[in-house]
Amino acid sequence: MHRPGDVVLGGLFEIHYTADAPEGTFTSEPQQPRCSGFDILGFRHAMTMAFAVEEINKNSSLLPNVTLGFSLYDNCGALLMGLSGAIALSSGQEEQVVLQKDCSGIPPVIGIVGETYSTFSIAISNVLDLFRMPIVSYFATCSCLSDRQRFPTFFRTIPSDAFQVRAMIQILKHFGWTWVGLLVSDDDYGLHVAQSFQSDLLQSGGGCLAYLEVLPWDSDRNELRRIVKLMKTSTARVVIVFAHEIHMIELMEEVVKQNAKGLQWIASEAWTAAAVLHTPQFMPYLSGTLGIAIRRGEIAGLMEFLLQIHPDREDNNKNNIVRQYWEYMFQCTFEPVGWGENGRTLCTGQENITKADTEFLDLSNLRPEYNIYKAVYALAYALNDILQCEPGGGPFMGNSCATLQTLEPWQLVYYLDKVNFTTSFGDQVSFDENGDVLPIYDIMNWLWLPDGRTKVQNVGEVKRLASNEEVLILKEDKIFWNFESKQAPRSVCSESCPPGSRIARKKRQPVCCFDCIPCSGGKISNKTNSVECISCPEDFWSNPQRDHCVPKKTEFLSYHEPLGICLTTTSLLGTFISAVVLGIFTYHRSTPMVRANNSELSFLLLVSLKLCFLCSLLFIGQPRLWTCQLRHAAFGISFVLCVSCILVKTMVVLAVFRASKPGGEAVLKWFGAMQQRGTVLVLTSIQAAICTAWLVSSSPSPHKNTEYHNDKIVYECAVGSTLGFAVLLGYIGLLAILSFLIAFLSRNLPDNFNEAKLITFSMLIFCAVWVAFVPAYINSPGKYADAVEVFAILASSFGLLVALFGPKCYIILMRPERNTKKAIMGRGATKS
């Protein structure tokens, strides 16, 4: 079909399904090939291009004073025919070529709209590249055609499979389908999709392929049976198919045989709108299918143009395409001979086209036609840009412009790269560096109605914006799901690992198949499907669910817990008793019992015992720097003061009885009141010096200990210097042992009230408590170490208080008759 013009555009369409090329097609005597199987939709595609050219010619603002023409060829569904047509369009078929003297003139066509199939487009683009002629495809989607090195003059108004694949992956991500099957056709279209799909799916982390199968071209029933059986046994509930209608028909026949239900089908654009599959046999399985469809558009005026197509009865050309169209529409024939065969009537040319029951006039679903419309306009806008070029400001050598008189195809390629316009339907059209248009797809859903009809409804769209952002829009409330739950199915190899766990890959299985391992203590994961658990900060620990970090529990000997309350109460009780005893001794300070053996030391001993009881309070409560420094120093000095007083009292007792023997009076001069005070002061000063040296060299300090419990922070006082602490305790022990030994030697002195026995007993209690303290302290963790030390302080203090002052208070308060000098110093008296 041809129409002359100032500039001619070529078109390649599939008007017939099959072609039987005669043997002499490429011989010196070419013959007309025989095409059969009229494709009514292919004819509508060709007529859409014719309409677009006519509309442009009527548009005074686009290509003014220029008439577009067209030359349309039928590829008859055969690659050989398509190549033949492309060569004819690019080089011309005139019997005699007349050249101008300067070899100038416009080529037979300046650009071509086509082809339908990717395989055809690859072959034809390789040929047209020799002429540097642009070809704008409306249906070839193979991502391989985006290779600008191989196909520098190829453009298309349909998105490439690369974007279709990404659109599919976006849908999978949206519904959480991470375990899917993929079926592809055994051609460039399917094999390139398989490669692209696997690569993009892996990069996006959106899921895994449970299986990848190639559908055979030769209707291999055994292979189809194996594939369908695999689909039934697989745990993947979602099946994506990139194939053609013929593949789907053969596949669905086997699906019906094996009754493979419960699958969610996702269709590529190649069969989303395939009405041939909308049969009662297939729809119980295919209902609910989600499909990627070419963008639907509206072309105003196309209906009126199609209604004007009418055959010319005077044209006796049997191959006249319009006559074939008319014969197909009304199942009639223009040939008088044999017109009654097969029920055909004789065409009159007066038949009413509006009453014909055909999809040719159903313009509610213009998809490939809309791409053809955009392809013609892209070429027209590129030509228009050429006309707008101002001399001296052109893009070519010497800032020259192209003109219609000298226009070469490669110059049109340059302007096609720059073209940018908006259709009447509101879609922006421009080509990227690979010749791909700004992609947009409709998302369709198949709904099988009760009356047996199939409704293919639009439920969303996926597109790439000019900012390169990809957007998925879905109307989920409109989607029909062919499952009992009427909801989207689950299709995962392994259920998602919830927060608090991590993924553990299974050996020799895809990454989507994994086990969920709970995070260990102190680690969390706050996202679904975390690859690893992250450690909590130092002062935090994982909650029981392991999904977030919480502050660690703190542990120390507190005033608010039962153990702390008991120890505090006991400490205050000891302090109170010491104060009471001090009051008693103060009140009865003139009595022999109080005055015996240096009452000043007794008062000092009671004060030191009060300090011992009070210093235990420094071990209770959260450790602070000052409490850590003070607790051991106060404890050490208080106990040394106490034991020093006891040591001096013991030595005085021994000295007094030694002085009572002949020649022993000289001993007493070394144990006067001043000497006693000086001895206590010196012994206590030594401990004070030890404490000072310890605090200066390596002071105790608060410490957060996490060694005992991972989930707790045990606040304790680090002693700083173990040697300092050992010297402090050793000095107290040395004085206590010395006091015990001296008192033990004085235990049999002949007094009615021999204080040496009391001191011996008190020192025995003191040493026993502190000997037991060391292993108990070492083996007690955390706050219990402080509790053991407090207990040792309180036990030894109570031991000293009771053993030393209990009998004296008993005599002072209960047996005052024995509180006399005679009773105390009497020799040989009967003891009661």
Image: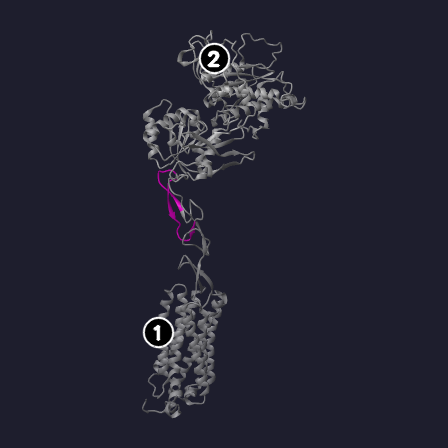
Quarter of the C terminus within the rendering: bottom left
Q: Which mark is residue 768?
A: 1
User: Which residue is located at x 45 percent, y 53 percent?
Assistant: 549
- Of pointers 1 and 2, the one earlier in the residue sequence: 2
- Magenta span: 502-524
User: Which residue is located at x 40 percent, y 66 percent?
Assistant: 785
Residue 120, x across and y down, in percent: 46, 20
Q: Is residue 372 visible?
A: yes
Could you give the CA–CA distance between mark 1 and mark 2, rounded to whole angstroms? 129 Å
Q: Is residue 662 visible?
A: no
Q: Residue 801 versus residue 184: which sits nearer the camera? A: 184
Which residue does the numbered mark 2 point to in the structure image? Answer: 347
Residue 492, x across and y down, in percent: 39, 39
Residue 670, x across and y down, in percent: 44, 84
Query: Which amino acid is tagged 2?
Result: Cys
SS under mark 2? loop
Vertical placement of residue 764 versus 181, above or below: below
Dot 2 alpha-carbon crowd within 10 angstroms: few under 14, some 14 to 19, many 20 or more: some
Query: Which amino acid is tagged 1?
Result: Ala
Q: Residue 557 versus residue 13: which sits nearer the camera? A: 13
Q: How many marks?
A: 2
Q: Quadrant of residue 724?
A: bottom left
* Residue 457 located within the stretch drawn in magenta: no
Q: Residue 655 versus residue 461: which sits nearer the camera? A: 461
Vertical placement of residue 51 versus 203, above or below: above
Q: Residue furthest bottom?
A: 822
Vertical placement of residue 24 versus 414, above or below: above
